[in-house]
Image: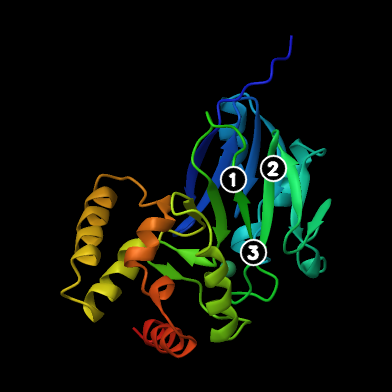
């Protein structure tokens, strides 16, 4: 008999140069976030006897949506969730969302948060978890927020991105941050160069370098950690944010 499981966990598949594909599973179904490519995802799902329930897309860049079509060949009934504003740039959508949209996957509600800046229609997916026994709240934020960094402004202005990060700052501090690239060491080196005497940044840099040297990912981080050591999240004004973004772009 088919039994529903509630063993929620999130698995990382590092691909390409520095992308991370996240797979969120309850032990029988799986939700894949931003599959840059399909092959390693297919392999992992099949090895673990998991059914693909949905693909979440944060934005339209090819290193986030590149594997979706091939995944749908093996799991044609899987939902594809993406921004309604990007219907043209993100194909195969079955659930088209906008800021504030709530929907349910694997018996968990998800909330869509609009975070434009990197692209105009970039969204993040927040999983608050409803049950006290479940894990910490999780945020799948694509290229909006990185470990100690944030996405480059390809389509939005500094003001747009500053506002987007301001929304994410409102989430509980325990929120686990699942971003789509492993950039944390480089971001912390940059932050350390600007604030060489900041102990929290130095400490995070040292521990992250050690983690990476052991072959581990630096992610997820927590919102609490980002509030302490992410200069973009810490920026108090649009002007400060703009200056930091420009500095980092030319670093
Ligand atoms: Zn991107």
Residue 218 appearing in the image: yes
Which is in the foreground here, disc 2 or disc 3?
A: 2
Ligand 1's image quarter is bottom right
Q: Residues within 10 Å of mark 2 (few under 14, many from 20)?
A: some
Does dot 3 land on a helix, a strand or a loop? helix
Q: Earlier in the sequence, mark 2 or mark 3?
A: 3
Where residue 128 is drawn, which disc sits there? 1
Residue 194 drawn at (x, y percent): 25, 81
Q: Earlier in the sequence, mark 1 or mark 2?
A: 2
Whether label 1 touches label 2, CB < 8 Å: yes
Does 20 sit left or right of 196 as displayed?
right
Quadrant of image for the N terminus: top right
Q: Quadrant of the C terminus?
A: bottom left
**Which element is circle 2 on?**
strand
What residue did someone put label 2 on? 109
Decide: few, some or many residues near mark 1? Use Cα within 10 Å; few <14, some 14-19, many ≥20. some
Q: Distance between the Cα atoms at labels 2 and 3?
A: 27 Å
Q: Nearer the viewer, residue 129 or 219?
A: 129
Residue named by callout 3: 62
Furthest residue in direction top, as rendered: 1
């Amino acid at each position: 008999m088919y039994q529903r499981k509630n063993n929620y966990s999130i698995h990382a598949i590092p691909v390409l140069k520095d992308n991370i594909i996240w797979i969120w599973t309850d032990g029988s179904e799986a939700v894949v976030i931003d599959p840059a490519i399909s092959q390693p995802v297919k392999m992992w799902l099949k090895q673990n006897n998991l059914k693909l329930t949905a693909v979440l897309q944060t934005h339209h860049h090819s290193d986030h949506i590149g594997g979706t079509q091939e995944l749908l060949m093996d799991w044609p009934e899987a939902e594809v969730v993406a921004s309604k504003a990007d219907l043209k740039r993100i194909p195969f959508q079955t659930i088209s969302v906008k800021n504030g949209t709530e929907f349910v996957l694997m018996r968990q509600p998800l909330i869509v948060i609009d975070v434009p800046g990197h692209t105009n229609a970039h969204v993040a997916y927040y999983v608050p978890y409803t049950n006290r026994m479940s894990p910490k709240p999780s945020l799948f934020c694509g290229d909006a927020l990185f470990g100690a960094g944030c996405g480059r402004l390809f389509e939005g202005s500094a003001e747009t991105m500053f506002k987007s990060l301001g929304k994410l700052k409102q989430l509980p501090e325990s929120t686990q941050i699942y971003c789509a690239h492993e950039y944390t060491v480089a971001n912390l080196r940059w932050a350390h160069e600007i604030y060489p005497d900041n102990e929290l940044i130095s400490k995070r840099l040292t521990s992250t370098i050690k983690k990476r040297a052991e072959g581990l990912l630096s992610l997820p981080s927590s919102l609490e950690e980002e509030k302490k050591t992410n200069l973009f999240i810490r920026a108090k004004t649009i002007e400060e944010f703009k200056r930091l973004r420009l500095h980092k772009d030319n670093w």
